[in-house]
Image (cartoon, helix red, strand yellow):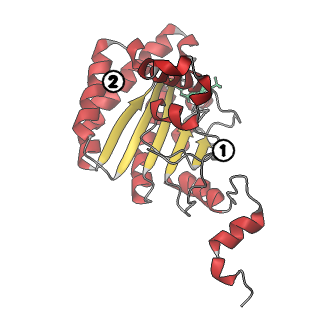
Amino acid sequence: MGLSTTLGVPQADAVPRHVAIIMDGNGRWATQRFLPRVAGHKKGVDAVRAVVEACAVRGIEYLTLFAFSSENWRRPAEEVSLLMRLFVHALEREVTRLARNGIKLKVVGDIEAFEPRLRELIADVEARTRDNDRLTLTIAANYGGRWDILQATRRLLAARPELAARPELLDESALAPYLAMAYAPEPDLFIRTGGEQRISNFLIWQLAYTELYFTDCYWPDFDAAQLDLACQSYRGRERRFGRTSAQVRAQAAPHVSNGS
Ligand code: IPE
Ligand code: IPE
Ligand code: MG
C-alpha cells in the first residue's frame, strides 16, 4: 500500500512516482476543427497510447487517467454511449500491446453501472496484465472522489462493524486500505489539460499533497514533450509536507548543515 502523505513524509524524487491526469479538452479540440466531439475523443485515445509509453520510458511507476467521471452521465446520451464504445474498442485493441510492454492495467470506479460486456472486458484485461510491473496504468471510469470515500467507508464498516459503536477508533490508516487506489502511492504530480483549473471530483482524498499542474493544451495534443514540461515544473517545486523550507533543505543535504 502507498505511504500516506499526512501520516508521514514520503521521499520526493526528481521523477514523480505517480502521475494522475485529467484528460480534458477533447470536445474543444474537435470543435475548433469543425469536427464532431467524437473526433476529439478518438484522437484522445492516441494521446493516451503515447503518454503511457512516455511515462514508462521515463521511469514513472504509476499513471492514473481520468476517463469518465460519475458526473459525465449528465452528458447527452449519444456522447455517453459513444464514450463507452470507444472504451470497449480501446481495451480490445490495446490489450496485447499493454501485455507485451509490461503494463499492468487497473480500472477504478463504480463499474457496476457498466454493461456486462464492458465489465467482462475490464476483468479480462486486468487478469491478463496482472503480473506486469513496468508501469501500473489505472483508468478511472465512472469514478468520483466522493464515491470513493463513501465506498471505502461502507466496506470498512462492513468488515469492522464494531467501529460504528467506537467511532474514536476510526482513523486515516483504518480507512485508507479500502480506497479504490490503495495499491498505489498517492500521486506526486497532477496534470489537467484543457485550461480549467479544478479537480472535478477526481482523487480528492489522494491529492492531499500532490503538486498541481494545469496546462491550456487540449488532451489530443498532449504528448511526451508536454509531459516533460509538466515534469520540469514538478522538479522545480519544493515539497514541504507541512515543514519549513530550511527543514527540507537540511534533510536533502544533512552533511553540509554543520557548516564544515
Ligand atoms: C474530456 O474531454 C473527456 C471526457 C470528459 C470524457 P471533454 O469531452 O470534457 O472536452 P471539453 O472539455 O468539452 O473540451
Ligand atoms: C473531467 O472533465 C472528467 C474527465 C476528464 C473524465 P470534465 O470535462 O467532465 O470536467 P468539468 O465538467 O469541466 O468540470
Ligand atoms: Mg471537459
What secondary structure is found at the residue carrying circle 1?
loop
Q: Quadrant of ligand 1?
A: top right
Horizontal side, residue 31 vs residue 97: left or right: right
Q: Circle 2 sits on which residue?
A: 88
Q: Toward which corner of the image does residue 10 lie, by quadrant?
A: bottom right
| Quarter occupied by residue 129 | top left
Q: Amino acid at mark 2?
A: Val
Q: Is residue 182 left or right of residue 210?
A: left
In depth, the one of 101 and 50 nearer the eye is: 101
Going from N to C along the chain, the mark reached first, 2 or 1, is 2
What residue sits 33% from the left and 53% below the top?
134
Residue at x 27% of width, y 40% of height: 130
Position of 54 relative to 72 (above/below): below
Vertical comparison of 81 with 215: above or below: above
Q: Secondary structure at mark 2?
A: helix
User: Is residue 69 depicted above or below 100 in this figure?
Assistant: above
Residue at left offset 57%, top offset 52%: 226
Residue receiving disc 1: 215
Q: Estimate the x, y position of residue 79 in percent, counting from the top left.
A: 49, 15
Name the amino acid type tagged 1. Thr
Q: Residues within 10 Å of mark 2 (few under 14, many from 20)?
A: some
Name which residue lies at 42% across and 37% down.
138
